[in-house]
Image (spheres, grey):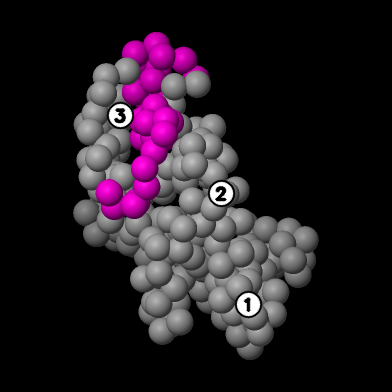
């Protein structure tokens, strides 16, 4: 695996790494590893698995200490908003991870450097690398630093709400199940299509939303269902 410059990333993270190979792995997509026959241990999926858990614990502890009077349900909803894909993509873009990602030729050609799921996964893998390299204390310092603007947005009520995640957290606790989404209609020409999504819980419809993409339609359906179930 060839070397590439991570010094700007380390400066943004304010860390002094001991094992730079871990960070290179965190930024290596499976398509790159498979294209070069590097094996499953060369890409970032295992680090992403670890980083996901590390991030959840770090954010949970920060919320617990920052808001001593908030009940468990509110803390859970705050955590869901902070660790949703949209929030992680914001931080990945701040760290310019898209420029550093090692992608296979096909993945790169299809816009992988800007794909939200890849950026969010790389961010979590990076936290997994920091944890293995420098320990949980350093992860907490990095998380506190990077998430400070998102905590500010959260307190102002301006942080993006991933209603699909919020609703799933709620329904798992309330109904011991997760929502089901179904695209029930596609309207308009191909260049200006509108999708309609239906959300049901235990086969009962709780929300119907529309959007320019299937994801937008599902988010709108989740928002309506969440407001119906939680806010009322």
Q: Nearer the viewer, mark 3 or mark 2?
A: 2
Please rate how many residues cluster around mark 1, counting C-alpha atoms within 10 Å: few if below 14, some from 14 to 19, many from 20.
few
Q: Residue at x 66, y 84 (%)?
A: 69
Question: What is the quadrant of the N terminus in the image?
Answer: top left
Q: Which residues are magenta?
A: 11-40
Instruction: Pick the residue in front: 58 or 27.
Output: 58
Q: Position of residue 156 (x, y in %)?
A: 41, 84
Residue with the mark numbered 1: 74
Q: Position of residue 19 (x, y in %)?
A: 42, 30
- For this orientation, the residue located farthest to the bottom is 232
Q: Which mark is residue 125?
A: none
* Residue 222 point in image, percent of width and height: 53, 68
Identify the residue at image location x=56%, y=39%. 49
* Badge 1 or badge 3: first in the primary sequence: 1
Label 1 and label 2: CA atoms lie apart by 25 Å
**Label 2 neighbour load within 10 Å: few <14, some 14-19, many 20+:** some
Q: Is residue 29 in sight in this rendering?
A: no
| Left or right side of 101 for 228 | right
Location of mark 2 (residue) = 136
Query: At 25% across and 40% down in the image, what residue appears?
Result: 7
Question: Looking at the image, which residue is at 39% across and 77% down?
Answer: 153
Marks 3 and 2, the one that precedes in the sequence: 3
**Label 3 crowd bin: few (<14), some (14–19), many (20+), radius 10 Å:** many
Q: Position of 177 compared to 98: left or right?
A: right
What is the number of the mark on residue 103? 3
């Amino acid at each position: 695996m060839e070397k590439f410059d991570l010094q700007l990333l380390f400066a943004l993270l304010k860390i002094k790494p001991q094992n730079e190979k871990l960070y290179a792995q965190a930024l290596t997509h499976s398509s790159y590893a498979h294209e070069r026959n590097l094996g499953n241990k060369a890409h970032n999926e295992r680090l992403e698995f670890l980083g996901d858990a590390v991030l959840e614990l770090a954010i949970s502890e920060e919320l617990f200490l920052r808001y001593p009077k908030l009940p468990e349900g509110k803390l859970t909803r705050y955590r869901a908003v902070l660790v949703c894909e949209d929030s992680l993509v914001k931080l990945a873009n701040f760290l310019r991870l898209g420029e550093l990602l090692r992608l296979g030729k096909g993945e790169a050609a299809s816009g992988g450097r800007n794909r939200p799921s890849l950026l969010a996964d790389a961010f979590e893998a990076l936290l997994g690398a920091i944890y293995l390299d420098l320990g949980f204390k350093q992860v907490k310092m990095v998380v506190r630093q990077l998430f400070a603007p998102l905590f500010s947005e959260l307190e102002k009520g301006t942080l993006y709400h991933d209603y699909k995640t919020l609703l799933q957290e709620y329904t798992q606790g309330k109904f011991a199940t997760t929502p089901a989404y179904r695209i029930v209609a596609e309207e308009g020409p191909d260049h200006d299509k509108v999708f309609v999504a239906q959300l049901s819980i235990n086969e009962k419809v709780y929300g119907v939303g529309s959007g320019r993409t299937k994801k937008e339609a599902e988010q709108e359906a989740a928002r309506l269902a969440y407001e119906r179930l939680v806010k009322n």
